[in-house]
Image (spheres, coloured by chain):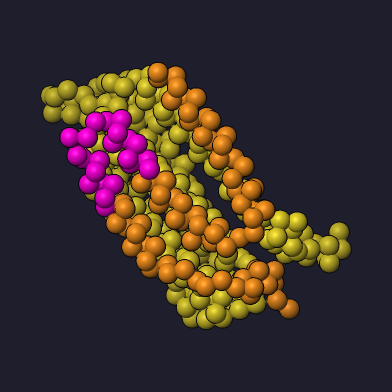
Amino acid sequence: MSNAASATMETGTSGFGVYNMKLGMWIFLLSEVMFFTGLIGAYIILRFAGPDQFADPGVVLNVPLTAANTFLLICSSVTMVKAFAEIEQGNQAGLKRYLVLTAIIGMMFVGVQVYEYMQLAHEGFIPLADLYAAHGRHAAEGGAVVGGPLYASTFYTMTGFHGAHVSIGVACLWFTVFKAYRGGYTKNNYGGVEIMGLYWHFVDLVWIILFTIVYLI
Amino acid sequence: MESNAAQEHGAGHKAPNYYLIWLVLAVLTLAEVGVAFVTAIPKTALAIILIAMALWKAVLVALYYMHLRFEPRRLWIITAAPLPLAVILVVIVLAEKW
């Protein structure tokens, strides 16, 4: 393939009025919509199938901690979009500042999630049926076991897949930061920042839905 | 030479107030957490209220942070394509209950 053809595939305008890379990212994100919808659908089936395995909001899961984490992700979305707005104006310093902030907040989100997992596992909220019966939440205190292994399985599957998406996003963000510091983006060439932003906002959007379904309902 | 991203955005739209949207998202999150613990509301109604608030937040992110509001109509069509499938999947699953 010639260099010209290669350049057109990456940055040329598609028939949809947007450049190819952006169209590609949108199509990827739409496949991700179906992926997460599949997970949510499975969660609904399992929740109706075994309502006794699930607990009311706040009984097992730490809602205040996760609400704070949700707030962090919302903050990272605004810093990401500000990075985009800065490079649109040709402001390199602003781009770097907001990209670094976004990556740091993203890492904080993952850190809080890891802390939450460790805390929950310590309390016996684990996806293994045999162990759950013996060490399930509150069982150690001699009380009734709250929820069941199905709850833990669905919780870790949904939030874990999301966490993996955030972690990949953080890695990509640091790559974008690296490229920004090498002058890879200008007022006239910032497609990479926009593509990164689309992915990052999507991760935020998915969390908004998951937080409501998994933690609040 | 200008990239395609710059050409698209060069045509221009007024940048939304990103901080105002951030504030709305934060307030809605706080409201969601508050509403979730109101025991006076029946569970089904509570679920509908919470999902409506979550969808509102998701739409704000898609429209303003992902700039979907300023994209060509053809991209809107692509974006909307899987949504009916997602709704069908969830509705059929929900219908199992009743």
Region of the chain picked out in magenta, as a range: B30-52
The answer to which image quadrant residue A72 occupies is: bottom left
On screen, residue B25 versus residue B79, left or right, reads left
Residue located at (59% from left, 40% from top): B82
Residue A111 in percent (x, y) is at 35, 53
* Residue A47 shows in this picture: yes
Query: Up-down: is B53 above or below A141?
Result: below
Q: Residue at x 25, y 41 (%)?
A: B36
User: Where's the N terminus of chain A, which quadrant?
Assistant: bottom right
Q: Position of residue A198 (x, y in %)?
A: 55, 58
Rendered hue of chain A is yellow
Q: Does A39 sit above or below residue A209?
A: above
How many marks the image carries: the answer is: 0
Asked if the stretch drawn in magenta spans residue A62, the answer is: no
Q: Position of residue A134 (x, y in %)?
A: 24, 22
Q: B33 or A128: which is nearer to us?
A: B33
Q: Residue at x 73, y 78 (%)?
A: B1
Q: Percent x, y for residue A113?
A: 35, 48
Determine the main secondary structure of the stretch shown in magenta: helix
Rendered shade, chain B: orange
Question: Along the horizontal axis of the image, is B17 left or right of A196?
Answer: left
Q: Is residue B32 found inside the magenta-colored segment of the image? A: yes
Q: Nearer the viewer, residue B26 or A118?
A: B26
**Is A142 on the left-hand or right-hand side of A123?**
left
Residue A214 seen: no
